[in-house]
Image (cartoon, helix red, strand yellow):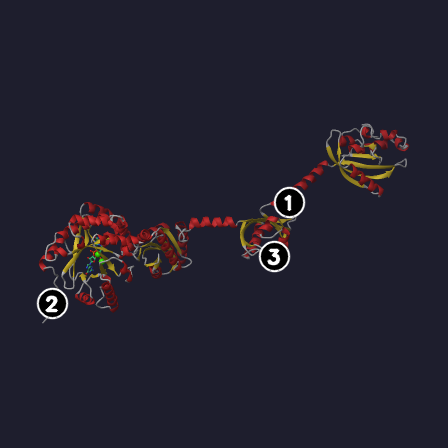
Amino acid sequence: MESVLAPVARSHHYSPLLARSVNLHKVLDTLVNNLEGMAYRCLPDVHWTMRFVSQGCHKLTGYQALELIDNQAVSWERITHPNDRIRVRAEILAAAAAGQRFTVHYAIQTRSGAIRRVKEQGVMVVDEGGQQVLEGFIEDVTEGFLTLEALAHAEARYRQIFEHAREGIFQTSQEGRYLSANPALARLYGYASADELIADLADIDRRLYVQPQRRERFQKLMATHGEVRNFESEVYRRDGSTIWISENARSVRDGYGAFICFEGTVQDITERRSQREQLERQANYDGLTGLANRNLLRDRIGPAIAHAERMGHFLAVVFIDLDHFKLINDSLGHDAGDQLLVEIAHRMRNCVRASDTVSRHSGDEFVLLLNEHFRANSVISHLQRVLKQINQPVSLLGREFQVGASMGVALYPQDGEDAQSLLKHADVAMYAAKERGRNNFQFFTPELNKVADERLNLATAMRVGLEQNEFTVAYQPKVDQHRRIIGVEALARWHSSSIGMVGPDRFIPIAEDTGLIGELTDVILRQAFAAAALWEGPQAAKLVIAVNLSARLFLADDLVLRVAALVRASGLPPERVELEITEGVFLDDSARAISVLNAFKAQGFRVAMDDFGTGYSSLSYLRHLPLDTVKIDRSLIIDIESDADVAMIARSMVGLCQNLRKTVVAEGVENQAQFDVLRGQGCNEFQGYLLAKPMANTAFCQLLDQGGGFIRAPIPPKPNR
Ligand code: C2E
Ligand code: CA
Ligand code: CA
């Protein structure tokens, strides 16, 4: 390696001392040339004319040292990037003028055209010949520069993200002050800028969270985990409105573990949350009534059982089915039906405790989960309250209705150990309640299982019975005040080949539920009309035959036509036929029900309301119905001779019916005293065991024949001597 000092050595300015000291020369050479970078001496002229450059020149610039010395091939001014030339010169000369060392950063263009970043450090000195020269060192700092630049870029990029993020980003102190916040956070909390937020929201602990414990919880999580994830809280915005946010944050610590700040992001999840809540509601709650649905009920039974077991309580699972709901729904319309369900749901919820569950299972079926009863007795009184609430009048379409419910109860632990069996047994018990005449509740007992099985058997047997003509009619006479027979009621009888005698109280409800009632009614009516057409005797031609029409039949469109066809086929004049209809039909005095009654009237039939006084209808309500006859229910007659209240009620009913010019029939008259009271009150007709039990047609024909059309009072026993 030739000495870079050679050109300098040729200079006449060169020190003879240095030229002579070859050894020293070599040492310097090695030192200088091994430096990464270029040592130089140059003149402060327009070219920065180089008088000396070290070997590093080549690596730095691509030029050989000799090419640069005395601007042989290129000057340093040329190598300096044009953008930086003026600045570099100004900085160097300024430092030189002040007698100071200088450091300048600038770019150079190498021989190959590449741009490199350099750092030049130097000083103005006077050389051996008394001339001012610059001596210094220029090194390539491109790499470091790029790193710095990258950092600056990164920083700028992150700032962009920070500034433009849609999520709020924050740093807060342990004490709950904002150290920094981005514009999104400011917007989220209702501030115009981050600065405003930082200035105003000085006390996060007390000002931000709607529930103050949330900040405590935040701190606690931070302390134990060093972070929080999806931490959801309700917070106040600046204007006092609230939103729901989700925070992800961590605590930032220095290299020694000392706390610096909390840092994290905030998202507004108000909408997401309300969607989630809505989904949850849809999944767990009934849309119409807002009650728990099947799913939620099922979810709750398990824990409720566990709780009952732990505490030694009873848990009651109660299946509730509204009586005759379908009737309301079909006749008043679905809106009214919905309204009824909402009202009943509301009432049920009001008479259970917070720990209880009221759920809607389907249609008009509800399930109650009653907790914390120590005795079966308290379940009973609780259910009595529920039933009473359900029974309160409901006003629909401007009119008042009374609704009944059949409820079945299964108790944990005795009636089932798990949700499924408790629900099943409550359902079985509910059917038993329906069979006991509805509007009551029944507990599940093993025997009730048999009842349920029997229901199924009965339905099957009924189908067989209808095919094999097992159904017959019994006739129960009705008399006037003089005990003259004026009519009969036809009552269905069934002697099943497989089961034996089954009473109508058992098979009619099943016929109604299974849809067999239509066929059964045809059978009964055909027999009854045929029999009535053949009766003989003094008033036979005037005897009225009453038949029962189930409320269920009113759902069919062709009821009037079917009955009319049966009567016509028998040859009986329609005015000798009375149709007994229970109050269930009148439950709605909707246009439809009334028009059915009117249609019957138009055909010439008589229409009677059966079992009056047991259920829904009020006295004044009768006024609007095209009825010929009102039959006062047996339950109002039983105590008539002994209970003044009952007598009073009966009297007012009879009085009202007479005012309305309806025929009043007392049914279930069992003794002479009842007969006398009722006759005294003005009752028109009487039916009951006192006069005659239901009997076969042949027996009734005999009665007509023998009694001359009267049912004679038994001869009073002779007084004992
Ligand atoms: P209902 O229409 O109220 O019929 C009167 C019921 O009271 C009959 O019971 C009759 O035997 C009974 N009864 C009559 N007098 C007395 C009395 O002095 N004391 C007592 N304790 N009971 C008396 P039955 O025949 O068992 O019928 C029960 C119910 O079954 C009927 O009540 C009616 O609702 C229904 N039913 C009977 N036959 C038919 C039918 O062909 N079609 C429909 N849809 N229902 C029917
Ligand atoms: Ca009847
Ligand atoms: Ca009756």
Task: Give the crowd class for mark 3: few <14, some 14-19, many >=20 residues within 10 Å.
Answer: few
Q: Which residue is mark 2?
A: 717
| In this view, the mark in front (1 or 2) | 1
Q: Quadrant of ligand 2?
A: bottom left
Give the structural element (helix, strand or loop) at label 2.
loop
Residue 658 is drawn in which quadrant?
bottom left
Give the structural element (helix, strand or loop) at label 3.
loop
| In this view, the mark in front (3 or 1) | 1
Give the structural element (helix, strand or loop) at label 1.
helix
Query: Against 159, is 61 above or below?
Result: above
Say which label, 3 or 2, has the lower sequence index.
3
Say which label, 1 or 2, has the lower sequence index.
1
Query: Against 252, is 652 above or below?
Result: below
In this orientation, which residue lies closer to the viewer: 613 or 364? 613
- Locate the N terminus by quadrant: top right
Q: Residue 515 location, x and y as percent?
A: 26, 48
Q: Which residue is mark 1?
A: 159
The answer to whether the residues at label 3 and label 1 have Cβ atoms under 8 Å apart is no
